[in-house]
Image (tube, rainbow, N blue to C red):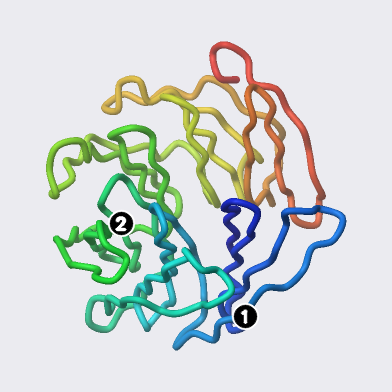
Amino acid sequence: LDVLAVDGALYAAGGEAGLITLDISSPSTVTLISTLTLPGAALSLARRGDGLYVAVGESGLLGRDITYRSQPVIASALPPEPGRSVEALVISGKRAFLAQGDVWTIADVSRVDHIGRLGRVAADAGHFAISGAVLYALDGDLLHIYDIGATAEPIDQGGYAGMSGIADTTIQGSIALLVGAAGPPIAAVDFSNPAFPIEVGSVGQTGGALHASVQGDAVTLAGGMNGLSAFSLTQNGG
């Protein structure tokens, strides 16, 4: 469901299979280091220093010290909001933002052995992306923009609802690449002024896309049954 490469190791959130650690230091001989069974399905990963954090649904957020990757041990846990589950997370500095459906939690992850609850925001979110001090919270057809620069309480700066069925978001500077499950497979939106986002380009007519990966000006689009597609970013983001 989610993967993260760190210093020759690949950590994979494997759903009900738990947290899987692979040795990828030699691409020709990838080997299994460990599989860690978790109290819930491993859904999303994020890292801060030697701390690896795992969203595990109804079991909340778990912190694992990856200093010794062959000895997987859970160092800390934070339960979800009552009646909810942690589906996704992203980390900025010492703070983690945890998506839990109609509410999201802000947590202190300055220490992997102690996760502290800092606050909550009563807003829908199923996926997050961060660029600098700006947090993008995806809720179905709506992308919310928050200023997270100087406070534990994010400041709502506006939103974008010009694309239906947004499946994923990737950020390049002030440009958000929105991946469409229903509309165009990918669209570029300029959020230089968050109150007035502008679509600067789109590709294709039909959806079904799942995720976009960006390296430099090259964009690779995972289209599920439609396979992989490659695009280039122009100077205006299109």
Kindly identify which numbered label has been placed on residue 97: 2
Residue denoted by label 1: 35
Which residue does the image show at 30% across and 28% down from the upper left? 194
Q: Nearer the viewer, residue 109 or 69?
A: 69
Which residue does the image show at 75% across and 56% down from the upper left? 224
Q: Residues within 10 Å of mark 1 (few under 14, many from 20)?
A: some
In the image, residue 15 sits, relative to residue 230, either above or below, namely below
In the image, residue 27 sits, relative to residue 80, either above or below, namely above
Circle 1 SS class = strand
Q: Residue pushed farthest top? A: 235
Which residue does the image show at 62% across and 73% down from the upper left? 20
What distance separates the C-alpha of mark 1 from that of mark 2? 26 Å
Residue 139: % across, % down: 39, 54
Q: Nearer the viewer, mark 1 or mark 2?
A: 1
Q: Quadrant of the C terminus?
A: top right
Residue 180: % across, % down: 59, 45
Which residue does the image show at 26% across and 27% down from the upper left? 195
